[in-house]
Amino acid sequence: MLPVACRPLRPPSGRHAAANRLGAGAEGRVGPLKITGLDCHGYELHYAHGEYVMSGGRAAVSQIGTLVRLRTDDGPDGWGEITPLGATYLPAFAEGVRTALRFLAPHVIGLDPTNVSAVGRAMDSALLGHQYAKSAVDIACWDLRGKAAGLPISALLGGVLQDDFPIYEAVPLDSPESMAAFVQRRGAAGIKRFQLKVGNRPLDDAARTRAVVEAATSDTIVIADSNGGWNLLDARIAMNAMSDLPVFVEQPCRTTDDCALAARHSNLPLVLDESIVTLTDVYEAKRAAGAASINIKISRVGGLTAAARMRDVMQELNLMVSIEDTWGGDVITAAVSHLAATTRPECLLMTSFFNDWTDGHIAGYHPRSVNGRGSAPTGPGLGIEVDASALAAPLFSVAA
Ligand SMILES: [Mg+2]
């Protein structure tokens, strides 16, 4: 069968538009919201603990972020964010974000942002892939959807299931002594879950992990994250050397298939991250790789819409889930917080509050963690107030 060509999408009209009026009460509007413009802002987010180091020599002291501001016709603005972790962590990079957003903007202008499904279809009809760039638009639409309804995003995702939830911090790859000291320092601040950056020489990585476990309190959860840095042999050596430690191993190799082979003879629980993009990948993670948990990054899967769908499926598949993104500031932390708060407590392994890791405080450092735990804002939409005056002029604006 020949593939069916996608037609350009139009804003819903008729009874669909009438239905959308139900969500416009908070603004006192008559009729659905309409996207009238997209502003693209750039900013730089510095790491709070010096240099962020991962396997394979990947290191940086800051990342380049992009904020999306969706403007509407006499209505509120919606904010979204995507900050890739350099250009070699995932197939995403800052310049690609901006080029894709400039291309996508005309395809979403004129649409009702509260219809996140229609906006997503319009973006997919215009551009294949580039989920990371679409993610910022999707988050901004959820912000607008909440503001139009007068409800926090958490309410629109099904409702809060946990008023506060555990957050974790990553420990940059360094000497065993330095990594242990990091965990002790941040543990004293209330953090009880740590993800160690490993993935270089396997016996050195095992020594790093052992030093951290010995320095941490007994109620601390430790994950050794190779970020796909080991080959099969190194993964087997590292996991054998850590077999007596109470730790998880995350993304030991680049592909799910290699992770499955590496973990086949190990007793250490397997977490997958970079190699899980689609729901098919989730099923493969469970059935073929035997993974116990998956780390969902909002931008890797295309936004809050897709991340919530993946989270829901994972819960039904009896998998643990971690909720976060690649990097970011207050906007991405707020988006993460709503998804985390609506996750079943027994299914949530951990979450990251990136505004604790970075200086991207464009919304007054909100939401803010307290003693190693986070919570979701209760105001409409993302529930934060972005201070646009603190940002440089937009890199570009596209208007109707
Ligand atoms: Mg990871």
Image: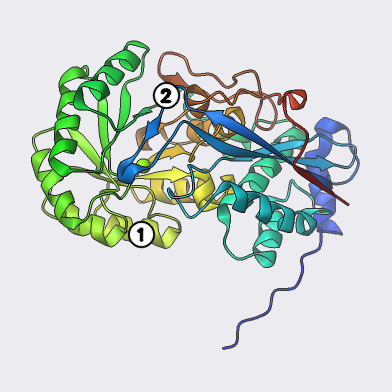
Quadrant for ligand 1? top left
Please tell me whether residue 39 is drawn above or below residue 274 in the rendered image.
above
For mark 1, does the 10 Å Cα neighbourhood hold few (<14), some (14 to 19), or many (20 or more) residues?
A: some
Residue ID at (66%, 56%): 120
Circle 1: residue type: Tyr
Q: Which mark is residue 50?
A: 2
Task: Tell me the residue at 45%/56% (across/down).
Answer: 277
Q: Position of residue 281 (x, y in %)?
A: 39, 59
Amino acid at circle 2:
Gly
Left or right? Give the position of 183 relative to 40. left
307 or 101: nearer the viewer? 101
The residue tagged with tag 1: helix, strand or loop? helix
Residue 104 in view here:
yes
Q: Which residue is mark 1?
A: 283
Q: Residue at x 56, y 40 (%)?
A: 83
| Number of numbered labels in the structure image | 2
Q: In the rendered image of this protein, does residue 227 appear above or below residue 232?
A: above
Q: Quadrant of residue 127?
A: bottom right
**Percent of width and height locating residue 236:** 13, 51
**Ligand 1 within 8 Å, label 2 CB:** no
Compared to 18, does 148 lie above or below? above
Q: Secondary structure at mark 2?
A: loop
